Image (cartoon, rainbow, N blue to C red):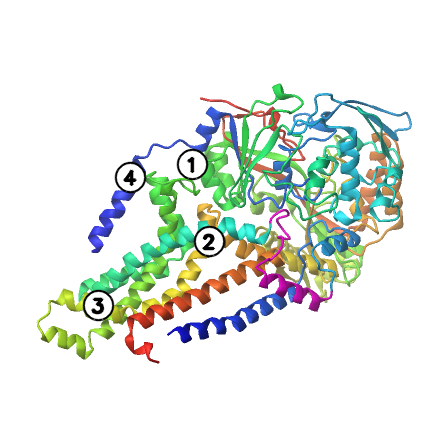
Amino acid sequence: MLSHFVRRLLQAIPTLWLIATLTFLLLRTAPGGPFDDEKPVPPEVKAQIEAHYGLDLPIYQQYFNFLGNTLRGEFGPSYKYTGWEVEEIIGQSFPVSLELGGLALIIALSLGIPIGVLAAIYHGKASETALMGTAMIGICLPTFVLGPLLLLVFSSGLGWFNPLGWSVASDRFLPALTLGLFYGAYIARLTRSGMLDTIQHDYIRTARAKGLKERFVVMRHGLRSALYPVVAYLGPAVAGLISGSFIVETIFFIPGLGMFFVNSAFNRDYTLVMGTVLFYAVLIILFNLLVDLIQMWMNPRTRHD
Amino acid sequence: MSSCRLAALLLALCALCGCEPRKTNVERGNEARELYFGIGTEPAGLDPHLITGLTELHVTLALYEGLATFNTETMEVIPAVAKSWSISEDGCFYTFNFDPNARWSNGDPVTPQDFIYSFERILSPALGAPYAYMLYDMKNADRFHKGELSDFSEVGVSSPDERTLVIELAQPTPYFLSLLTHYTWWPVHPPTIEKHGGMTARISEWTKPKNFVGNGPFKLEEWRINSSIYADRNPFFRDPDSVWLNGVHFLPIQVHAEERAFRAGHLHLTSTVLPHRVNWYQDNMPERMRFDTALGVYYYMFNTSREPLNDPRVRKALAYSIDREAITEHVLKAGQKPAYHFTPPNTGGSYNAEARLIYDPELARQLLAEAGYPGGESFPTFEILYNTSDAHRSIAVAIQQMWKEELGINVTLYNQEWKAYLSTREAGNFDILRAAWFGDYDDPNTFLSLGETDNGNNHTNWSNEDFDQLVEAATLATGNEARFEIFQRAEALLLEEMPVMPIYFYVTSLLIDPSVEGWHANILDYHLYQSVRLRSE
């Protein structure tokens, strides 16, 4: 198990290098530069600005400088937001996204798993259609529709929540729900199909034949295997959830990381793009690794592979 | 946990939130004398020598002050750090007498030497200040900035004593005092700059709240990126009694969420009003919406090196066949004014272009026929390029339709995201390009100099010696009457040649809470927080 863990960590190195290199190349081939503006600066001024950021060096040198800085964990200053280091921006924004994503994940799991299990138990009955129909709505409703809808009802209509912001505890609820419902709906579908698949297995039949209570059969024997696909899905999903959602952050005015992901690319803010992309890549790799470990724990067979 | 229990928990949480008594920002702000201002986007920085945008101007106006400022109601230039000034007879020497009460937010006196240091900083080529050219009217400033001169003492600024600053101009510049209100002319605190990287360090921590020293009515207290900026009262401000507010909160709420924040009482002021909400406010809350004429023009640029746009008759035909009123009334719908000339009305106080382009489809067809394309026959298809935006698209679609109907010609629409669009513009790889210009200062020169051959913002490939001479002559002429007369001729020539096709003049629109007093409409969107009061109900 340890060797598997170490092997996976080593595999992450070329993956990260490839992501960093591709992002670097894509950014440099995209038309327009970080210091192009509506009112263009004179070429000599632009040259001075570029010199500040080492953009006057040959491209291969820029690339090696960038790789060296990345290894030291230094992405450098943002080109757009003068006075801010990329690490500072991520450091201020990530905790917010982490909190929002974490809450959304709790909502997603607390809704998705029970709904999925119930739908599998009531397979073929009207309750299943109702439960899965609801989940389908969750999947089909994009966050930019769901967010404003929730606001319309709970903020403008009932006045229970602030329409935006991130200052008081209750400000977390609507954005977390907006983000969590989509993932919850997906988890419900995965749980249901996993559960349906599992309860047809012989060991479940055996458990039933032994006279165990249905609830015990489902929860003790069925659920662990049924959650296998859910756990696999959660790796990249959690990385996505906690690294910020541009749409939800914009709707609710939340100072998270999502905005920087999108705007840094539009602004050609090279350092900020590299910082956010690599940060996200590391998160995905870490969570996928975590998923592997959890799956090993859940399924003894894989431990010996 | 069963779904029922979960639902009960959620409902309990909702009920709990509902019970929490909460004051809105506006209510809190009115009590604490704090203004909540939506600025639409995160400012790119707070260093006055490096910023370029309106958002940044709005924040920095709270934090710094130059030699002179505007009375935002009358747009008259009034004293600030300089309590008075005198101008030499030839109009080339300005002598500023400093207010002895002028202090930095750490208590240091603001001195003429601070200004000399600041001018040297912004003009230092190594800093790469994007708007350093705003100081070019000062003698030798351009040469120093371009690296032709290395000794700053040869630049036209000096300090004969501790309270006096003398600026020597390269030539008389009638609008010079209004230039001083621009952030490029504001001072920075030399010891702070030196402590955080030195004069030409672009990458510096000095604008962080813990390091910040400014000389404005407020000082930077808190800056959480993408969340809020709070400026607290500066106890050392030179005229503390003029400041009523205790603080200003700047909230970078995206424009789509701003109106919601305003309705919920989270903002006293917004950065803009979205066009689709204008009618609603006009019908229901007209007192909460304000339109101010802005010093900006929206126009299309012709690439005059490409056929058939190299023919002025074709350019005029295209310009004359557009119903600008239909565009402002039915497409834009937010108080914009149709533009029949290039320089916005009342620029420089009283400049109103006499030359006018007209809406005359018949004449347009005739001109097109003269150019060899009767009824649009054999007219090559060309492209309108705009940066990706619904608003630009709507205008382009309307114009495409008008040209099709009136002239029988086909154009295709092409959009690119912002940076790609700028890159295409720089390469001159377009037929017709959407463009806009906001005046850097209140004078026709900021608009008409765009047509000069060597102007970096003239991407049309149009070059006209007479026009260049007129703009140059206007710069050298003394007295606004004489200058404006020359500008009239330049504007007439521009409309005769039509390298650019004006479409509409911008307005700034915003939502304003009834408690806000002293927020004056003006063309430069220049607002001093000293004049703002909040009326508690």
Chain under numbered label 2 = A
- Are both tags, 1 and 2, on one chain? no
- Are both tags, 1 and 4, on one chain? yes
Count how many numbered circles sit on residues in the image.
Answer: 4
In whole angstroms, how far apart are the C-alphas of marks 1 and 2? 20 Å
Q: Mark 3 points at which residue?
A: A120
Chain under numbered label 4 = B
B344 or B216, which lies in front?
B216
Image quadrant for the N terminus of chain B?
bottom left
* Quadrant housing residue A113: bottom left
- Tell me the residue at 80%/47% (across/down): B494
Image quadrant for the C terminus of chain B?
top left
Q: Residue B382 location in percent, x, y?
A: 69, 63
In whole angstroms, how far apart are the C-alphas of marks 1 and 3? 44 Å
Q: Which amino acid does label 1 sit on?
A: Ala
Sequence-first tag of 3 and 2: 3
Return the residue found at the far left. A211
In whole angstroms, how far apart are the C-alphas of marks 1 and 4? 20 Å
Q: Name the residue under label 2.
A: A247
Stretch of the chain drawn in magenta: A58-84
Q: What residue type is labelled 2?
A: Ile
Asked whether residue B473 appears in the rendered view, the answer is yes
Element type at mark 4: helix
Element type at mark 2: helix
Side (left or right) of B478 relative to B258: right
The circle on residue B16 is 4
> Mark 2 packing: few (<14 Cα in 10 Å), some, or many (20+)?
some
Q: What residue type is labelled 3?
A: Ala
